[in-house]
């Protein structure tokens, strides 16, 4: 199995952005199942305590033990269940959680069963991307399963994120997305050592040559990149690089580069630099080309976006991205 280097992975992680978070505490008693999934975004499920299993159509049963982390693909239905203590009896009770909504400020919790829960998880859904538009999980077609332990403190991190969503204080959007990014970084670090097949299936991580070019592009978005120079970085021919890059990321290299530059520009608008200075800093010699690219990415001109930065909350800005 070919792997990225630690330096390449570090460059990729620095560009990861989490843009949407919804987390719920899930409690399941013996003899019960909780139906979840079916959303258009990937799911994250971390087992805090107890033992049970996740059943997903078309995939092997996932045994859940304490500190098991599962990432489920978009649009995938599944259920979490705890077999009855009597092994001869099948799971016969279920709670439908796929379409339940919670009012603002309410404790987000599913309770499947009336007895003391045996399985306790934090489950949720999120968006994560490189730059402005490259979905981190765009090619995920099978669940990612990794076993952690208490030393990584993922349980505490997710509990903090869940409490932030309940409290809805100033900065909730920024805090919850930052906490979830910590969990994703812990998972992606595993790609350096994990022997599980998800490493090869996981979009960018599955093609070390394309990952090499992308990490270079992400680390230096303002550089005068071209398809030929990026192909050279990837150690591929121009035609092979174009085909493989587009297959892995779903967009051609220059489109992805433009997204990375626009994200950097949006971040720099929180400083006192002029629009012209920012345009040059992200690789644009033409002001008009920069303004057009920024408007296409954010639906707003840089000066208007800067004005909103000074008035909007972090969660409002995340929703606009």
Image (cartoon, helix red, strand yellow):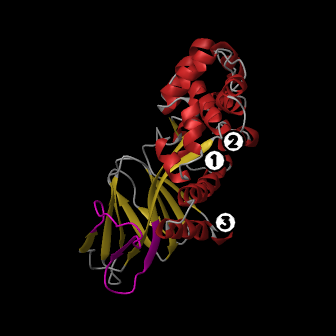
Residue 242 placed where, x, y %?
56, 18
Q: Quadrant of residue 212?
A: top right
Q: Disc number at residue 242?
A: none
Q: Examine the rendered structure and indicate whether residue 84 appears above or below residue 152.
A: below
Q: State the CA–CA distance, disc 3 to disc 1.
A: 16 Å
Which quarter of the rendered picture does the N terminus lie within?
A: top right
Given contact means CB atoms under 8 Å apart, are the residues at marks 3 and 1 in contact? Answer: no
Q: Which residue is mark 2?
A: 9
Q: Which residue is mark 3?
A: 152
Q: How many marks?
A: 3
- View extreme (right): residue: 7
Q: Examine the rendered structure and indicate whether residue 62 appears above or below residue 92.
A: above
Q: Describe residue 157's horizontal placement relative to residue 299 as left or right.
A: right
Residue 30 placed where, x, y %?
35, 80
Q: Examine the rendered structure and indicate whether residue 88 appears above or below residue 47.
A: below
Given contact means CB atoms under 8 Å apart, are the residues at marks 1 and 2 in contact? Answer: yes
Q: Disc number at residue 191?
A: 1
């Amino acid at each position: 199995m070919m792997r990225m280097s630690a330096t390449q992975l570090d460059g990729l992680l620095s560009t990861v952005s989490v843009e949407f978070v919804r987390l719920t505490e899930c409690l399941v008693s013996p003899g019960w199942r909780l139906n979840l999934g079916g959303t258009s975004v990937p799911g994250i499920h971390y087992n805090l305590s107890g033992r049970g299993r996740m059943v997903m159509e078309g995939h092997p049963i996932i045994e859940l033990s304490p500190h098991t982390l599962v990432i489920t693909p978009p649009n995938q239905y599944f259920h979490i269940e705890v077999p009855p203590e009597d092994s001869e009896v099948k799971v016969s009770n279920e709670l439908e959680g796929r379409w339940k909504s919670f009012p603002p400020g309410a404790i987000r919790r599913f309770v499947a069963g009336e007895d003391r829960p045996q399985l306790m998880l934090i489950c949720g859904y999120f968006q994560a991307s490189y730059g402005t538009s490259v979905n981190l999980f765009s090619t995920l077609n099978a669940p990612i399963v990794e076993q952690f332990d208490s030393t990584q403190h993922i349980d505490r991190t997710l509990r903090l994120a869940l409490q932030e969503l309940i409290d809805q204080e100033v900065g909730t959007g920024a805090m919850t997305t930052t906490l979830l990014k910590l969990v994703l970084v812990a998972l992606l670090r595993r790609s350096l050592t994990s022997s599980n097949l998800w490493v090869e299936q996981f979009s960018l991580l599955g093609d070390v040559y394309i990952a090499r070019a992308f990490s270079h592009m992400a680390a230096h978005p303002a550089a005068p990149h071209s398809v030929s120079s990026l192909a050279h970085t990837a150690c591929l021919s121009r035609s092979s690089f174009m085909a493989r890059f587009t297959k892995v990321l779903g967009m051609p290299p220059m489109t992805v580069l433009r997204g990375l530059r626009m994200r950097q520009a949006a971040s720099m608008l929180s400083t006192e630099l002029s629009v012209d200075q920012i345009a040059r800093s992200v690789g644009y010699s033409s002001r008009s080309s920069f303004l057009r690219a920024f408007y296409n990415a954010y639906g707003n001109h840089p000066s208007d976006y800067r004005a909103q930065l000074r008035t909007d909350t972090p969660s409002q800005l995340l929703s606009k991205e």
